[in-house]
Amino acid sequence: MQSDRELIEQIRERNAPAFEVLFERYRHLLRKHLMHIVREERAAEDLVQEVFLRVWTSAAQWDGRGELRSWLYRIATNLALNHLRTVHRRRQQPLEVPDEPYDDEDGTSTQMPAWLIDSTSPEPQTVLEQIEQREFLWELVDGLPDGKREVLHLVYGAEMDIRQAADELGVPIGTVKSRLHYTLKRLARECKELGINWNEW
């Protein structure tokens, strides 16, 4: 099986088959990651396509340091945040609703029905703040040693359970558990020092 580095090198040369291989390798993981952020299937699918468009046009931007998966996640997260900001701006546009409801010629009231107003959804700005905080946490994760960083990406990014992560890494389940315990403890400590709410993780 070709490595990520080999595929990227071929994509830089506009090798379409290599691009297809990389697309199949990561599209499901990226879709899960994006769904966590945008919470909308159509938007997540569109953003996956946008991520790989960036890969095709800007493969040279990956310098080969760190994991390709982390680079793809950063692209995906930035695109998702831009998407949420766009949605937020659209929702801020005022609706042309009359001050007082009135009856149309056929007797139909123009008053907005109560079920159309979702008062339980969080404000878009709140969602953005939470996502940006998670993005900063992932930046902390990227600063971890390779093995421990990979465990976090598999368990929280790719939503694998402990056994699946162990199989993916080719290590015992106990090793995954100990790495997970270490990394979460370290991240919690770093977040506390930085004044970040760890409960938002």
Image (cartoon, rainbow, N blue to C red):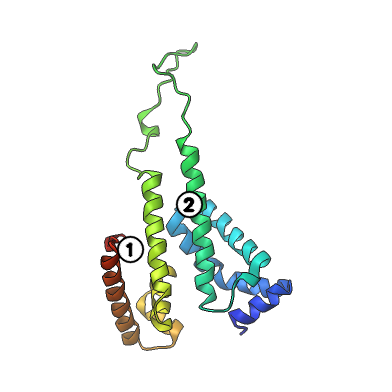
Q: Amino acid at mark 2?
A: Glu
Q: 15 left or right of 112?
A: right
Task: Confirm or deny contact between disc 2 and disc 1 (CB under 8 A).
Answer: no
Per the image, label 1 sits on a secondary structure element best described as loop
- Which residue was labeled with disc 1? 201
- Give residue 36's quadrant in the image: bottom left
The spot of residue 145 in percent (x, y) is 40, 82
Residue 156 in the image, given as x and y percentages of width and height? 39, 69
Rendered view: 135 above or below 19: above
**Mark 2 vs mark 1, CA separation in Å:** 20 Å
Give the crowd class for mark 1: few <14, some 14-19, many >=20 residues within 10 Å.
some
Q: Earlier in the sequence, mark 2 or mark 1?
A: 2
Q: Residue furthest top?
A: 105
Badge 2 local density, few (<14 within 10 Å), some, or many (20+)?
few
For discs 2 and 1, the disc positioned in front in the rendered view: 1
Q: Is residue 153 visible?
A: no
Residue located 67% across and 66% down the image: 56
- Above-or-below relation of 95 to 196: above
Task: Look at the picture and state if 102 lies above or below 15.
Answer: above
Residue lying at 40% horizontally and 17% vertically, measured from the top left: 101
Which residue in the structure is indicated by mark 2? 40
Front-most of residues 114 and 90 = 90
